[in-house]
Image (cartoon, grey):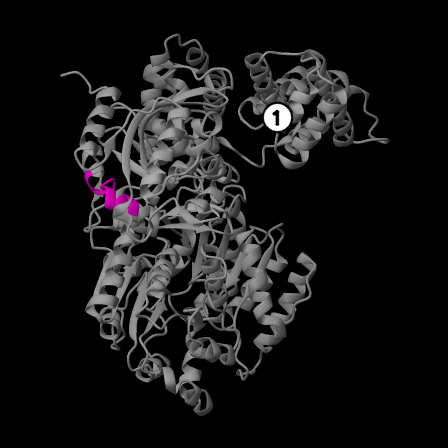
Amino acid sequence: MSTQSEAVLEENLIKRLSQSVYERIEIKNEEELISNFKVQLEKLNKCQLTDEEFNKILLFLDSGSIFDKAKKLRDHFFIDRKDNPFYIKFLNQKDWCKNIFQVSNQITMEGKHKNRYDVTLLINGLPLVQIELKRRGMPLKEAFDQITRYTLHSYKGLFNYIQIFVVSNGINTKYFANGQKKDLQFEFTFFWKDLENNNVRSLDDFADTFLEKCNLAKMISKYMVLNESSKTLMVLRAYQKYAVEAVLHQALEIKQNGYVWHTTGSGKTLTSYKVSQLLAEDESIYKVIFVVDRRDLDLQTNKEFNSFCDGCVNTTKHTGVLIKNLTTDGKGKLITTTIQKLSKAVKTAGDKAKLQRIKDKNIILIFDECHRSQFGEMHQAITEFFTNALSFGFTGTPIFAANSDGTRTTKDIFGKKLHEYVIKDAIADKNVLGFSVDYFGGAKLKDIPDKEVSKINKKEFLESDKRLNQIVDYIIESYDSKTRNREFNAMFTVSRGGVVHKYYDLFKKKEHDLKIATIFTFKANEDLSEKEHSQDLLDKYMKDYNEMFKTNFTSDDFKLYHADVSKRMKNREIDLLLVVDMFLTGFDSKLLNTLYVDKNLQYHGLLQAFSRTNRIINKRKSQGNIVCFTNLKENVDKAIALFSDPDAMEDIILPPYETFVKWFNQDLDRLFKLVSDACEALELQSEKDKESFVLIFRDLIRNKNKLDIFTEFTWKDVNIEEQEFNDFKSAYLDIYSEFKPNGDDDGESVIKDIDFELELLRNDRINVDYILNLLEDLDKNSSSFEHDKQRIISIMKEHENLRSKIDLIEKFINERLGNIDNKVTSVSEEFDDFMRQERKEAMCEIVEKENLDENKARQVFEVYEFSGKIDEDLIKQAFLEKLKFKERKHKVNTIKFEIIDLFDKFDY
């Protein structure tokens, strides 16, 4: 039987949707789309619109970004009729099943280029869901890449109201929220799931579940979030939606407590926000109180909640404000606070009296990270005071009997587990990364017998100068490897006592260029025998911090210092943060990828600490790196078994170094069966052979990306020399240059749709400055000059970010390098002058070649340089000749790509 074509897949989907109450409608172009929209809008609002009124609606809908339009979709438009004014709604968010559902296909839109879209789902005449299909056997990524191309080339008008994209090849189907091209990443596409966390993969099953009309309208109406801070659309994942609905059912119908177990890093904040928001909207609920257990988390929660819904949360800077928010009826039903403030309010006589009138109100208490502080007197005092309150907990690491230390479990406190999504699920779904766990010296987790390390636990050994020195040396040596040449950063957690001070002093004495900071709490009354007080030491460390970052903190400003450290860690301004307990829970930074550990961790504490490193950001961050200086193997096994299942180890902990070497060499065998060297790769004629080369080498660079993390990696362990690998890399990039998309041709090439994963080849340290340093040593009078020059050019060919500058560097070497007087100017200064002149000439070439007005063209260049935006109207104003519409449009596109290429070439 032949492979099912894309057209058959498309037709079968439309038939399936048509059978489930979607009206099939034929829409050929934008004009018919707008005409249909008017009809459906009138049906929804039970009105007749004049052409003038409808044109005003179109004008209102047309302005703004994708984010602005998502807000307009959920808003109303006022029709100002003298006799009977009324509001038009575009989406029925309350009775979502009562919207009007249609399906169409092959709608043609023309922007920069003409495109026809596969399947479009219209709700009330607006195209809110776009489905792109690829035939069975084709990678899902190609459908995703097609959508990102459409965002550049043709999505406009009402198609900018798309809320959700769906991509499928029949056997695999995923969905994601709309956004600007820069916000669309394949890593953030999601599978739909059933209630048991099984992926709904096939297009037929996806159509029956996710695309079922009531579920789809509900997802758009209730389970999307418009993030005000990032101006992006967010759509809940299946497990988040199920958890929200489970809590709503438990709170509003069953009226009993419960808790949600969603692993760290899986988006608990968004889930808990949605729960809080929807409960606060219910008329039967008096207040929803979101309770955290630390002040810094209170600030963080307020910031994140308000990013989801600006101004929707009442903050509580002190207990007085909390009481005022609690006792004020009406608006401001959602309140965030700390458990300390809330317990103080219900225990202090004066505050307690003010709260008497609301103690029996229908209140919802939502406890964040309920594994930590909800087991003591504060929690008990709160739940005993509010007699009619329901309590719900969210945690990534519940307390079970095994990790309870004989105290109460999460179930004892909160009752029924309402939904779970464990770390094994999150790693399988690529919502978080797995971990690569090393021991000091590079030995792998499975290579160290317990007997060898279990006895090394005496304080005098663990704190000996020799041991601490070795560890510090190892961290300095391994840092660049672990953090991918400082693209990411690291934390180092140590045991309590004086160890943190010893480590800090050792780092200060060693030769390195790492920016190191530390933060820890101190007791007011410490044992001061033979040591300085921790607060005085922290002040001393803060002086180093102040000098490094031009700040002015002291231990009296601890909260401000904490916030500043957090911000600089997230911005990757700090290389290594030395901590004891702080930042091991509740701290999220996508740029943190490594945790060095010299302390005992177990159960929830271990998994929480490890999970600081496994947030997804890009392809170069392939795992969270854990380096242990004490034997935690048994603890790791127990924690993973407890919080996932006993068989999850291989899914959560990455294989050892030797396995990656084996996989790399296996991929090499595949490569050498196709071509013997890089020259042969460049001589491949057929697209099929070129495609095979690209796919094999892509697998190699993925594995190489992971090998680079291991400090013991050496080219001797793999069956290829480094230079030969780099030659293949150049061939890979040459094929990319041959097939990379451009503005003039959509093309039918299969290779054009392949994700080349250039991101994995980026190396921030191999940049123009690096090349200029090499040029400092290049002597035109030396016999090795040509060889050295070619070596520099070869290095540039190996790095995609430098390839566009090869001609410039070569011209600089030939024309300027031999004439530099080092006493007067440096190579870098001469290069700056050279680049300014070359860029000016390149701009003049564009002006002359395209016959443009020089002043207007200069304005176009300046606008792009400072804003990153190309002003098409200004380009048209720069034309010195009259052109027909199509000629003018083509010329605008040509100039745009010339400008982008020019600035890419001269950006360094």
Q: Residues within 10 Å of mark 1 (few under 14, many from 20)?
A: some
Majority secondary structure of magenta residues: helix
Looking at the picture, how far across and down is residue 851, in whole percent? 70, 13
**Residue 216 magenta-drawn?**
yes
Residue 1's place in the image compared with 770, above or below, is above
Looking at the picture, how far across and down is residue 281, in whole percent? 35, 63
Residue at 63% across / 17% down in the picture? 787
Q: What amino acid is found at the position of numbered circle 1 in the picture? A: Glu
Residue 136's place in the image compared with 315, above or below, is above
**Observer able to see residue 74:** no
Q: Residue furthest bottom?
A: 349
Q: For mark 1, what is the residue? A: 872
Q: If the image is split into quadrants, where does the N terminus sit?
A: top left
In this rendering, position of residue 876 left or right of residue 276: right
Q: Residue furthest front?
A: 83
**Observer able to see residue 248:** yes
Q: Secondary structure at mark 1?
A: helix
Looking at the picture, how far across and down is residue 682, in whole percent? 45, 12
Q: Residue furthest right?
A: 824
Q: If the image is split into quadrants, where does the C terminus sit?
A: top right
